[in-house]
Amino acid sequence: MALLVQKFGGSSVANVERIAQVAAKIQRFHRAGDQLVVVVSAMSGETNRLLDLAKQISSTPSPRELDVMVSTGEQVTIALLVMALEKAGVPAVSFTGWQVPIRTDSAHGKARVLDIDGAHVRQQLDAGKVVVVAGFQGIDPDNSITTLGRGGSDTTAVALAAVLKADECQIYTDVDGVYTTDPRVVANARRLDRITFEEMLEMASLGSKILQIRSVEFAGKYNVPLRVLHSFQDGPGTLISLEQENSMEQPIISGIAFTRDESKLTIRGVPDTPGVAFKILGPISAANIEVDVIVQNVAEDNTTDLTFTVARLDYEKAMDILRKTAEQIGARDIAGTTSIAKVSIVGVGMRSHAGVASRMFEALAKENINIQMISTSEIKVSVVIDEKYTELAVRALHSEFGLDVPTVAHA
Amino acid sequence: MALLVQKFGGSSVANVERIAQVAAKIQRFHRAGDQLVVVVSAMSGETNRLLDLAKQISSTPSPRELDVMVSTGEQVTIALLVMALEKAGVPAVSFTGWQVPIRTDSAHGKARVLDIDGAHVRQQLDAGKVVVVAGFQGIDPDNSITTLGRGGSDTTAVALAAVLKADECQIYTDVDGVYTTDPRVVANARRLDRITFEEMLEMASLGSKILQIRSVEFAGKYNVPLRVLHSFQDGPGTLISLEQENSMEQPIISGIAFTRDESKLTIRGVPDTPGVAFKILGPISAANIEVDVIVQNVAEDNTTDLTFTVARLDYEKAMDILRKTAEQIGARDIAGTTSIAKVSIVGVGMRSHAGVASRMFEALAKENINIQMISTSEIKVSVVIDEKYTELAVRALHSEFGLDVPTVAHA
């Protein structure tokens, strides 16, 4: 008998048929003797319908009132799911955020969880009930309803799992787990049985949008084992936890992440004085543009070249700013391109294995792929390359690091 | 400067345009210096949409969960109205039932208000804000959301007005006041400036469906002046209060009510023994059929005839029961008809005026309208007549009791 927190997102509860399917799945766990807390999102489309109503009234609606309104989406789902569970003979009860209560700060629309009182939930669990909790919402010190922002239902689930000391927090999605890379690019990409929190964070921030980064950070902080599963297919999914895989054949690399959403800007021939990086990047940040990879080289003539990447959407704006900066600081010229891709290898195995980066560079060189920028962290190496080589690079690296062949038995 | 509680129903907030119109109306009161508590219902159609969703899941949904779901309708409206008020430059804040809090018993779907804490509302009023409260909902001793049942928003408004000792509780509707009778039947029916709680109760229960009976009872009990007004037309409406009109020409009759929703059943030649009425009507009540007018006569041969009316929808069912009863108790025969109408004159003036009933009967006799049944209360006389004479009877009585001509100046 385990205590499980399960989270079903908007597409898993999109209509009454799917809600009935979710109820049937929960019923199986309940019959097996598990204690269950189920966190649900609004039926898909509902949050946008409500936001649209608000927009019709005001272009700048009060954040407090937006939360009052938007939070009704999950409130409807919890009631419907409990009805479906009761119809299936499973005793259940619903809780809104304030009924738990899930206490947050007052940052409406993006509130942070401060504290959860698990007593009421525990009481209902002990009474043999499945407890269905509205995701994405809480209550602030003034008794106002708050929402945690998009993807906040994942955070609700993880936070509840932490407070209740659940055995596992299961996130049900439209994929059956975390893959070594995007299966649409590499046909024999492989579902990972396990991955660490750190690896998942690097994978998530690099474009594998299965889980909200915030909820993975949260899970890591409180060591809540997270499992990604498919809502309507059976399977073991992928377990995200603190520990590495207990396998003799520990893989060095867990996955290959990539993104085509970036663009590259270069400023050349800048007189190399202290604080030059700040002079160049300060105005970019001030315009609310996030800078990702940064590379700086000092040339022999005592000038410096600086290259950085920003989201492709911000490219034009960033170029305008950079042009003005170049004039002010007397740079030689600027250049930029949007046809780049960033490809990364991610794996905690890197820590204990030397030469992983050079093995990556060699694999790319074999395919005649030129590397434009390099950025490294403890468990990740990223390269920026010409966009047209994206698939080729991902496949080459997937193969080079042995990800095509399962290294552990499937459960 | 007055403290007003205003209630706008579902059709007054049916869409964003109407919500903006309601906001504009509230703005005028706010500018005039009034303190305002505004109670709103769900946008029309929303409650039914939600109930329909529940029905798709289960034919017997849990009443607790139905309330969790249905209460979201008003929660959306309060947020939208506050947004519209803020856009119009009126500071405002929303409260759900539990945020007030409005404490009720646990009878989900038809909860009764136990207690309202007015402190939070008062605090916001004192801060210069319009307080927008979700109608129809509350919270029970277990912290579960409850609803007060259909029409419950009127009750919310009256209860808040009582607790806050408001100067007036204004109910905005799709009519501009209470009329002496249905204007569709009597073209020169007149809007009443004032009416007493008692009279309104008799008018409401007889088919003038402007206000929920329960909220009028509530208002009378706590002596909250109620005013019925049109949501989108200006005008003084009708004030419902404890006092009669302060006019020299006090009208004896305030209005003529009528209903065609009833049917009449008769059982004849029943041996007249004690308890015979119970033997006849007991089985009817046991079948959950409400009996309205009852008339019993004892004939010379020591048998009795009993005639009663029930809702037309229940006619067939009631006849079946009566047939069985007739056999059991040895009655001579039974009869029935659905082509009847009940016409009533209502007025507190009856208390101090003798002969009102006979004046009514005389007026009907003049028109050759045969009276089938008579029922009287302290401030009401009802007659059952052939349905085809309904309009004729209402017009004759409207004229006879001087309701065609205004007896007080219009405001």
Image (cartoon, coloured by chain):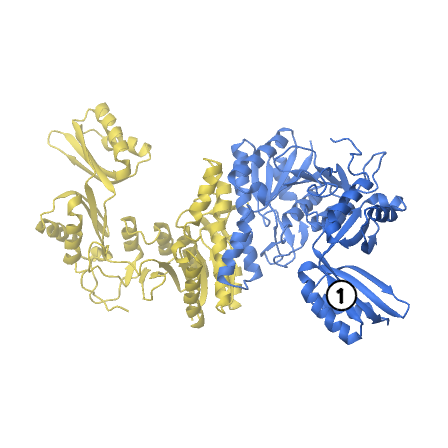
Chain colours: A blue, B yellow
Residue with the mark numbered 1: A335
Q: Relative to B268, is B123 above or below? A: below
Q: Is residue B403 left or right of residue A174?
A: left
Q: Is residue A125 left or right of residue A352?
A: left
Q: Quadrant of residue A187?
A: top right
- The image shows residue B361 at horizontal and vertical percentages of 13, 49
Quadrant where the N terminus of chain B is found in the figure: bottom left
Question: Residue at position x 37%, y 59% from top?
Answer: B171
Observer able to see residue B147: yes
- The image shows residue A360 at horizontal and vertical percentages of 84, 47
- A91 or A291, nearer to the observer: A291
Q: Relative to B343, is B290 above or below? A: above
Question: Residue at position x 44%, y 63% from top?
Answer: B20
- B134 or B407, nearer to the observer: B134
Amino acid type, residue under disc 1 in the picture: Ala
- A111 or B32, nearer to the observer: A111
Q: Quadrant of residue A307?
A: bottom right
Q: Characterize the local packing of mark 1: few (<14), some (14-19) or many (20 or more) Cα atoms within 10 angstroms.
A: few
Q: Relative to A172, is A322 above or below? A: below
